[in-house]
């Protein structure tokens, strides 16, 4: 533990060190709510060590990478390409939205 000299006394530094601020996306925010409600030990440990923000940013980044990879793979498997987009835009949008909603569920189940 670190201490600070105040006059004749050494007082413990109870506040965690300041960590770098990261932008947290939707998956990081959802994961934050989840661990705050369901995994209090992990939440308190990350909070007191000052690593909560970087941990959530890492989770969010991993989820975004997984999303990009899965969208590309599933679109190729289902034959969704630029030709379909040119021929029938509404069908392309419908199929891509379907893929995105399935991927949200996949990512949420993988992360949590």
Image (cartoon, rainbow, N blue to C red):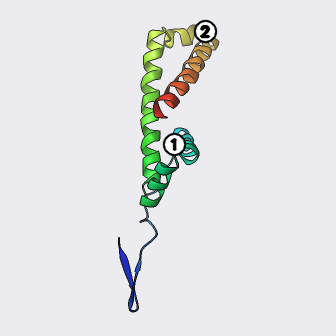
Task: Write the residue at 60% across / 17% down.
Answer: 93
In the rendered image, the vertical position of residue 78 relative to residue 46, given as above or below = above
* Mark linked to residue 88: 2
Q: Is residue 57 visible?
A: yes
Please name whichever residue, 1 or 93, is drawn nearer the observer in this view of the structure: 1
Q: Quadrant of the N terminus?
A: bottom left
Q: Provide the secondary structure element on which disc 2 rests.
A: loop
Image location (x, y in percent) of residue 35: 53, 45
Image-quadrant location for residue 33: top right
In the rendered image, the vertical position of residue 112 relative to residue 3, given as above or below = above
Task: Write the residue at 49% across / 9% down.
Answer: 78
Please name whichever residue, 47 or 26, is drawn nearer the observer in this view of the structure: 47
In the rendered image, the vertical position of residue 51 relative to residue 65, given as above or below = below
Q: Provide the secondary structure element on which disc 1 rests.
A: helix
Q: Is residue 22 visible?
A: no
Image location (x, y in percent) of residue 8: 38, 92
Task: Write the residue at 50% across / 11% down.
Answer: 80
Nearer to us: label 2 or label 1: 1
Question: Which sits earlier in the primary sequence, circle 2 or circle 1?
Answer: 1
Identify the residue under disc 1. 28
């Amino acid at each position: 533990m670190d201490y600070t000299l105040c006059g004749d006394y050494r007082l413990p530094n109870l506040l965690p060190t300041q960590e770098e601020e990261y932008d947290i996306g939707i998956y990081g925010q959802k994961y934050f709510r989840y661990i705050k409600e369901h995994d209090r030990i992990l939440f308190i440990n990350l909070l007191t060590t000052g690593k909560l923000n970087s941990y959530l940013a890492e989770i969010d980044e991993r989820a975004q990478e997984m999303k990009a990879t899965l969208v590309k793979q599933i679109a190729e498997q289902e034959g969704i390409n630029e030709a379909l987009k040119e021929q029938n835009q509404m069908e392309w949008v419908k199929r891509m939205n379907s893929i995105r909603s399935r991927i949200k569920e996949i990512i949420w189940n993988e992360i949590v």
